Image: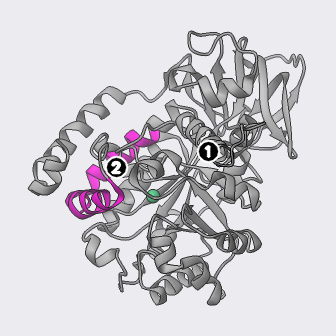
Amino acid sequence: MSTRKILIKGGTVLTFQKGSLVCEELDILVENDKISNIEKNISIPDVEEISANGMIVSPGLIDTHRHLWETAFKGTASNWTLMEYLNGMLGDIAPKMGPLDVYLGNLLGALEAINSGITTIFDWSHVMNSDEHAEAAIRALRDSGIRAKFGYGTPGTSVWEWFYESKNPHPQNAYDIKKKYFSSENELVTMALAIRGPEYSDLEIAKQDIEMGRDLGLQISMHIGGGVFGPKYKGVQKLDQLGLLGPDLNFAHGNTLSDADFCLLADHGCTLSITPEVELQMGLGLPATGKALKHNLTSGLGVDVVTATSGNLFDQMKTALQTERAIQNEKNYKRGDMSQQVALRDVDIFKMATIDGAKTLGMDQYIGSLEVGKQADIILIDIQKLGTAPSFNPLSSMVLYAKEHDVDTVIIAGNIVKQGGKITYQTTHELILECQVNATKIMGQLTSKTAVKNQ
Ligand SMILES: [Zn+2]
């Protein structure tokens, strides 16, 4: 098989390499799925050249927590609290989802992510109403071309049975799903287990689910520290008392965890996914960005639900950054001081969206930075456009100004999936229409309570 070579020339490479930030004009050579060279003025024959003049060349962004199937219901939850969301989305909409609905939502969501420069996503899929639903979700991820961890969750058939101190163990079908769809290594889509954990299931069930995830050899993700559920269930302390904390556990949110909880998570090498925009809206508490950094807890960012927030990671970077600054500024103000410096810097957030996001998903050996030998997950951001130009600081261009329409090129494992500002997936328009028709049918079947809430 011949080697496909892509040369990205003339851009400003912005990445962490071995813990240090690199920001300079360099060329990048991609051979098949990997980065084979990074240096100034690479010149070789027989290569597909991409000009990156006037652009930032960055590692693909990593979304560590999103429920992709909900993409079909964009805007539904724009005025919802967490409890309204749980009852409306999981209680009312999820039971009505068929496999095709899951496929359409997942595919549209994955393409939306790619279009905005996200090259890896953790799809936390809690609509596993049947094995066909799981197959549809996995097929959509594969069809999109994105790199993903498919988080196999519980059925969405009844939020009352499967959440809220549920006594139902995680479906054993996880074993069949792994055997059937994830038997080979080095695939773009790999598997994880998306469990309810101590805030949404009985503690004994949480223990059994974690043990099952370990038996399967999968990363295990759960929601924790969301609003009053944090202090009420003391989930981190309970898991610690059972000796269950470990580096294979990923927690989403963590807003209302205590300092002692953060110490426990960091000490055991657990990871945290912060989804700041929806946390602010739905009443989960203030985003834990600063606390996580203070405790050296490996953390990444996530969109969580596009039913209430935008699907790009730029908005999450900016929300996390400015919220943490506001929290610290307010503390200083209350002491009668003006802040002498901002609490968090653009570089900290860029790190969370790239290499620390990869660490959060246990994938930093091969993604999250632009380094020779790593997978070619690369994005080009145009910084010579209205909205991004002039650019005196590539970091602030990435964190504060860029949006999906500034993402010129997206490469995942050496495959070009967006070029010249256009996604290469051929039938996006038809997909949008089909998704809308199917979602409209489901919306028409909702109970009056949920329907009224959408007005
Ligand atoms: Zn979530």
Point out the stretch of residues depicted in magenta: 81-110
Q: Nearer the viewer, residue 313 or 170?
A: 313
**Pointer 1: what residue?**
330
Along the line of sight, the residue nearer the viewer: 367 or 168: 168
Q: Is residue 156 above or below residue 350?
A: below
SS majority, magenta: helix
Q: Nearer the viewer, residue 173 or 246?
A: 246
Q: Which residue lies most toward the right here?
A: 40
Circle 2 or circle 1, nearest the eye: 1
- Specify the amino acid type for callout 2: Glu
Judged from the image, the quadrant occupied by ligand 1 is bottom left
User: From the viewer's perspective, is residue 401 above or below residue 297?
Assistant: above
Residue 120 coordinates in the image, percent (x, y): 59, 46
Residue 402, by quadrant, is top right
Q: Position of residue 137 (x, y in %)?
A: 39, 54
Crowd class of label 1 (few under 14; some 14 to 19; many from 20; radius 10 Å)? some
Q: Which residue is mark 2?
A: 70
Is residue 97 in the magenta section? yes
Distance of label 2 from label 1 (alpha carbons): 35 Å
Q: Residue at x 23, y 56 (%)?
A: 93
